[in-house]
């Protein structure tokens, strides 16, 4: 038997629990499912003749008509067999006890369904023949079949899903089936290049490395219940493991041996080319009539972009459709289970998971599928820093005014413009062979706590620049997306730029119940962070070398927040060029990094300019 490393085990269990079956329920739920539902298994025919494996749980009480709740997944509808039941049904136990017809389907090319799997199957605007299929047509054909073949349905369908199933929920909207009246894409992948694969061109190394061996259980047209074989390597110290591995080419030379098609597709397409454009579902989200609840977590390390931009695109391109948005203090899928009351050392003041499940998610589907009353706000967002829910009509809120937060000489940070001379800058030497860790502990994988983690360890490094405000004399609330507008230069021909926005606690800060081993006095809590591969500064489809020594603008989005920096705190910004192994290393030489040799990685000196002529700043939205 192959040795299963801790990284692999934790990742695959987290992925399966989060995505395939987000709510496993408890023993009473399991007993209730068996006592009150009958399970059926079908091979549902698609228009091109392929059949998709579908499990249907129907209430035993046939005196009523029920709406459908459907989850289409690439993570398996297990357990298989008409006598083997899930431990719970629906997004939460609330649905189980309220009575629905629950439908779970293996998507095309996965597990027990026929067909060849494609990552984020490209959607087609026009379907000319029956062989012109995508996830939208597969959803349409499934809904049509269910309405005609499952008795006691009320003619209404709801769809939900988290992460990849969130993407399939988004593509369900593209079926535009009239019976689909409610859908909730949760942490949906929207643009594979920008969500899971690359962030502004920087490859998300640690999140992807062990995912694909576990995900790739078949690459053919043969249905199977077989799980994937695990890789035979052991990771205890992720930083050391990936440094020892060296360049990205070694992922195949040392481990995968060119056996994983989906992994190779990422390595073969480091630029935003047609391969990725075909996997951006946002282009297609028009003419949607279905009511939508988009859900995400502020600390979703995988698909924060997908949730925010799915909502923004739907609202922009479908102004007459009811679109709802919920963002809480959760990690990837965290709203579907557990209390949602803290992350790492940071406390969120209460059980935000149950609040969402009852007051938002359950209320949304009940209203559109069963006609119950509802007063759900169009936008429900959790304000971190002060730990309170806020309701708005749109996101970002109209009350938020755009301001610039400037990096100033001497490590200062201010809303006042710089007055320094043109040659004012800070500089540091970046060595890709001694990269800055992304988390202050020995970890085998991607610790989701890094998104709120203490950044004091980074501040102490010479290859991290730090800027901070004076002590705040009043609360400052930032609501909406953050843009970094940097003026930089480098002695190399490429460089990554990492910007982190940080809430610095006062010395008087007291520990909370989650911080038994960590003092919150002086804590530097990460609020938002993002990387930018510098060669993509003028477009992700056209990499461009830096001219050594030339002052160059590098602008990129850090995504949205709703956070209050409280009176007595400080706002801090850190700038660095490595963030390992969260993202892969940049050799700081202009080349295809996926083909770089170990000898290509070079030191370079980077400058960040802080003058009136060449200002560097963050563009933020401040609540007035």
Image (cartoon, helix red, strand yellow):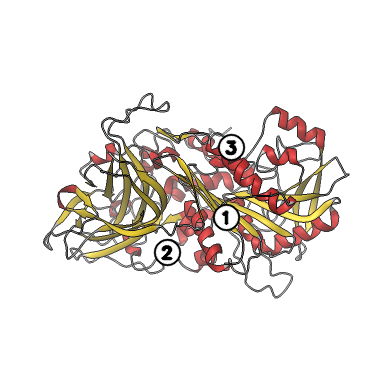
Q: Residue furthest right?
A: 63
Residue that label 1 marks: 324
Disc 1 packing (10 Å; few <14; some 14–19; many ≥20): many
Front tag of 3 and 2 = 3
Identify which residue is drawn at 51% across, 57% down. 393
Residue 469 position (above or below residue 276): above
505 vs 122, nearest the viewer:
505
Residue 492 position (above or below residue 106): below
Tell me whether the residue at label 3 lies in contact with that at label 1, contact meaning CB atoms closer than 8 angstroms: no
Identify which residue is drawn at 41% across, 50% down. 561
Residue that label 2 marks: 271
Residue 309: image location, x then y, percent: 50, 59
Element type at marker 3? helix
Tally of numbered discs? 3
Query: Tag 1 or tag 3, which sits nearer the N-term?
Result: 1
Tell me whether the residue at label 1 lies in contact with that at label 2, contact meaning CB atoms closer than 8 angstroms: no
What's the distance in space between the residues labelled 1 and 2, CA to CA?
33 Å
> Toward which corner of the image does residue 441 lie, by quadrant?
top left
Quadrant location, the N terminus: top right
Disc 3 packing (10 Å; few <14; some 14–19; many ≥20): some
Labelled disc at residue 354: 3
Element type at marker 2? loop
What's the distance in space between the residues labelled 3 and 2, CA to CA?
41 Å
User: Residue 69, can we see it?
Assistant: yes
Horizontally, residue 503 falls left or right of residue 354, namely: left
439 vs 89, nearest the viewer:
89
């Amino acid at each position: 038997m192959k040795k299963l490393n801790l990284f692999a085990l934790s990742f695959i269990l987290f992925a399966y629990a989060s995505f395939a079956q987000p709510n496993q329920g408890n023993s009473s739920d399991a007993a209730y499912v068996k006592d009150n539902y009958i399970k059926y298994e079908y091979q549902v025919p698609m228009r091109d003749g392929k059949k998709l494996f579908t499990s249907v749980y129907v209430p035993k009480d046939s005196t009523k008509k029920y709406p459908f709740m459907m989850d289409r997944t690439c993570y398996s509808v297990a357990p298989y067999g008409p006598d083997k039941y899930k431990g719970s049904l629906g997004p939460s136990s609330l649905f189980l006890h309220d009575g629905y017809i629950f439908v779970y389907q293996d998507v095309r090319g996965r597990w027990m369904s026929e067909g060849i799997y494609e990552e984020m199957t490209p959607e087609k605007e026009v379907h000319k023949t029956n062989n012109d299929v995508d996830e939208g047509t597969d959803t349409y054909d499934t809904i049509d079949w269910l309405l005609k073949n499952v008795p006691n349905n009320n003619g209404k369908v709801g769809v939900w899903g988290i992460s990849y199933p969130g993407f399939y929920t988004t593509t369900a909207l593209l079926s535009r089936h009239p019976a689909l009246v409610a859908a909730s894409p949760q942490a949906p992948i929207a643009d594979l290049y920008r969500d899971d694969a690359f962030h502004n061109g920087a490859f998300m190394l640690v999140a992807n490395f062990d995912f694909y061996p576990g995900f790739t259980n078949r690459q053919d047209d043969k249905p199977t219940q077989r799980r994937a074989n695990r890789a035979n390597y052991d990771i205890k110290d992720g930083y050391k493991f990936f440094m020892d591995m060296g360049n990205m080419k070694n992922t195949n030379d040392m481990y995968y041996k060119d056996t994983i098609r989906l992994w190779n597709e990422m390595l073969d397409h480091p630029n935003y080319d047609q391969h990725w454009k075909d996997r951006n579902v946002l282009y297609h989200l028009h003419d949607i009539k279905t009511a939508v609840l988009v859900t995400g977590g502020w600390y979703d390390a995988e698909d924060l972009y997908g949730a925010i931009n799915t909502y923004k695109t739907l609202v922009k391109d479908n102004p007459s459709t009811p679109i709802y948005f919920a963002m809480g203090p959760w990690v990837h899928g965290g709203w579907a289970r557990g209390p949602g009351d803290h992350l790492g050392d940071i406390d969120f003041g209460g059980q935000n998971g149950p609040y969402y499940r009852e007051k938002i998610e359950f209320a949304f589907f009940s209203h559109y599928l069963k006609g119950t009353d509802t007063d759900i706000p169009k936008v429900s967002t959790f304000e971190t820093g002060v730990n309170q829910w806020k309701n708005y009509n749109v996101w970002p809120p109209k009350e938020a005014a755009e301001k610039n937060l400037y990096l100033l000489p001497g490590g200062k940070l201010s809303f006042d413009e710089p007055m320094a001379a043109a040659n004012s800058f800070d500089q540091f030497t970046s060595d890709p062979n001694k990269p800055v860790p992304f988390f202050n502990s020995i970890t085998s994988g991607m610790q989701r706590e890094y998104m709120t983690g203490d950044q004091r360890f980074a501040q102490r490094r010479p290859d991290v620049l730090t800027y901070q405000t004076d002590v705040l004399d009043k609360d400052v609330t930032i609501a909406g997306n953050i843009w970094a507008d940097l003026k930089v230069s480098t002695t190399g021909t490429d460089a990554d730029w990492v910007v982190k926005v940080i809430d610095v606690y006062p010395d008087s800060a007291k520990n909370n119940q989650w911080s038994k081993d960590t003092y919150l006095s002086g804590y530097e809590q990460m609020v938002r962070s993002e990387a930018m591969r510098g060669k993509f500064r003028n477009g992700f489809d056209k990499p461009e070398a830096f001219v050594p020594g030339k002052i160059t603008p590098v602008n990129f989005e850090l995504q949205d927040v709703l956070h209050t920096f409280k009176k007595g705190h400080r706002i801090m910004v850190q700038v660095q060029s490595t963030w390992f192994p969260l993202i892969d290393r940049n050799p700081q030489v202009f080349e295809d990094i996926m083909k770089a040799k170990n000898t290509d990685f070079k030191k370079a000196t980077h400058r960040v300019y802080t003058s009136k002529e060449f200002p560097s700043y963050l563009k933020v939205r401040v609540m007035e």
